[in-house]
Image (spheres, rainbow, N blue to C red):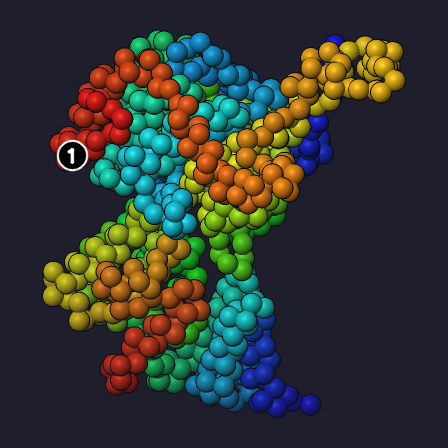
Amino acid sequence: MKPEPNSHLQALSQAIVQGLVDEAGPLAEKALDAGLKPLQVIEQACVPAIEEVGRLWEAGDYFLPELIAGAEAMKAAMTVLQEALKSSGQSLKSAGRVVIGTVEGDIHDIGKNMVASMLRASGFEVIDLGADVKVERFVETAEREKADIIALSALLTTTMLNQKRVVELLVSRGLKDRFKVMVGGAPVTEKFAREIGADGYGESAVQAVSVARNLLSGRGGKHD
Amino acid sequence: MTEEVLRPRVRFLSQQAVEQIIEESFELLEKVGLFIENEEALKLLADAGQKIDRAKNRVFIERGLVEKCLKTCPPEIRLYDLEGSREYLVGRDEVHFDPGSAAIKILDSTTLKEREAGTSDLVTLYQLVETLENLDFQSTALVSADVPKEMADIYRLYLGLLFSRKPFVTGIFRVESLKPMLDLLVAARGGEKALAEKPLAIFDACPSPPLKWSRLTAQSLIDCSRLGVPSELIPMGLTGATSPVTLAGTLVQQLAESFGGLVICQLARPGAPVIFGGSPAGFDMRKGTTPMGAPETMMIDCAFAQVAKHLNLPTHAYMGLSDSKLVDAQAGLETAMGATLAALAGINVVSGAGMLNFESTQSLEKLVIDNDICGQALRLVRGIALREKPLAVHLFSELGQDFNFLVLPHTRKWYRQEHYFSSVLDRDVYDTWTALGRLDIFQRAGKEIARRLSLYQRPELCREKAGELRKIMKAYAASCGLDRLPEVPGLKE
């Protein structure tokens, strides 16, 4: 007996929640083969699944490896689904474009990588500049890529000041209103974020997603 | 009568496991190689016939070269205090504790909040550590926020040399600081040759996990080796984040990174002193943090020392520190477990005392408490001595009817050697403790700090060298845009 469309959605959703990176792609293909529309699969399987991963993380049931595996499984499914959308002449509404990196002088990129993975999994387009990124490069890339958000990571108290320098450069070039700036990293606090004039601060990779969404929610229509 | 004393010891690896870790790290160096971002180091390796992928700065290091370098690396190092009179053996199973280094904050004694440290905090810390008898070495333990960041590394060594007799564990934050920092040491010792003969400081150099030696750290290895200054290699894999998640897997990577450092040092100058150390951590998958007080962290440290001892090299670890934010029960638990295990593992340089909050906050109170923790750990490894022969039978014929052990000359002869006396642990009876104000250990430590600081005496040699040190410091400060050095409390310049 051929499985019901619903069971395809369920299987894919479960694969993402369980972080089965190798299975998520093929399961997405199966769902399409069964006649489901790419957008329907995304909205009814993928999005609820990654939200469940986030919920399990916040509840303390999931640790970092499960969180990352969930995001990677989501990415594998989305690669298949976006390809299908493209060939049918459609495109997915981007949640927003984010230029992300660890600031100058800082080579720590674990936290930044997690935020990038979670943002990607949540429908953001992410341009990852890596670690030890010069202040100018953030701003120039954001301009060139027409980004919505610049996300700055720092692990060291000595380098977190470079987050401030990015904001200052944006102000001096009259670009502060064009990009939202969000900051994060072990020594960074909400208070520090406010002091340096950043627009958002997230304590964890999961929080970073809701912060990014909130930052862009005030810009309704821009991505439609 | 000491030949029968057992030195208590802890081991985490079987002989077979040690050999397998060594074997695999050779394989890692040959197949995956190391990323080395330093031209001079790359040239040394190329001249030694190693295969280099220039596009990626990746060097494939042959087993034969590592083995050759292991032969020229001294199995033990001797450090000397400022006067050059007291000698400290770094090797065998000798254990030396020193403060955890490069904290960016200090725990304020009054507010119990962490804050940035300034010149006067560094001076107080150095003076206090001079009085802590169970910390053999100083470390440049605090970063001073009242000077430009560009000179933060050298400034802490400068202040240290103004006030300390004990040898230093230090290191650089910037390549530019290496020369003036070495200049300070040469000045303090009275010449390059004298410094090479009697090292006054160890330089930490941390590879970047996985498998990378940066421009900065590789340069530190090369320049220190040429001057005969010992390099302490500090790999810092985080299990499951920047190194394999298994403890054994992390050990393989840590050894490969260390072999890379060892080879660079030996190529720079055969016979250069190298210490195999580390600051790995069992990465916390829930919090994304790097707990130094986790048992897994300590197991990697002890096991790595075991591997290094098998290779006949001096050892180091970041142990005896805590992730707690206050000097509380967690701080005591983690510090005591680490210091005890480190001593039992026979680790030669153990950095950690005073440190809280993942190697980022120093506390004077904790330093005083940790001095006792280290003292107790050192007592453990001195073992149970067989002081006299017979051990006890002869005493009973000397004892009268009342069996009064207190009056025996034997008691007076041995009690200080047999027992460790702490300075801040509470062993009072309840009423005395109440009469003394019902103080907890943190409060008692506060009083002890004041008592010890009142006993501190500045070494005469520090006074004599001050002018020369200041000249070097001033010149470098000027190049960093600072015309006037901050005032140093208690010094008339």
Vertical placement of residue A89 versus A132, above or below: below
Q: Secondary structure at mark 1?
A: loop
Question: Mark 1: few, some, or many residues within 10 Å (few <14, many ≥20)?
Answer: some
Residue B479 found in image quarter: top left
The picture places residue B246, in percent across and down from the top left corner, at 61, 48
Q: What's the residue at 46%, 36% (across, down)? A: B447
The picture places residue B226, in percent across and down from the top left corner, at 36, 17
Q: Quadrant of the N terminus of chain B?
A: top right
Residue B93 found in image quarter: top right
Camera-side residue: A204 or A144? A204
Q: What's the residue at 30%, 34% (across, down)? A: B120
Position of residue B105 in the picture relative to residue B13 (left or right): left
Can residue B304 be seen in this snapshot? no
Position of residue A83 in the picture relative to residue B479 (left or right): right
Q: What's the residue at 59%, 77% (across, down)? A: A14
Q: Quadrant of the C terminus of chain B?
A: top left
Vertical placement of residue A53 versus B75, above or below: below
The picture places residue B40, in percent across and down from the top left corner, at 33, 27
Parent chain of label 1? B
The picture places residue B192, in percent across and down from the top left corner, at 32, 12
Residue A152 found in image quarter: bottom left
Vertical placement of residue B179 versus B99, above or below: above
Dot 1 corresponds to which residue?
B482
Vertical placement of residue B78 versus A31, above or below: above
Q: What's the residue at 13%, 32% (across, down)? A: B483
Position of residue B429 in the picture relative to residue B47 (left or right): right
- Mark 1 is on which residue type? Leu
Position of residue A69 in the picture relative to residue A176 (left or right): right
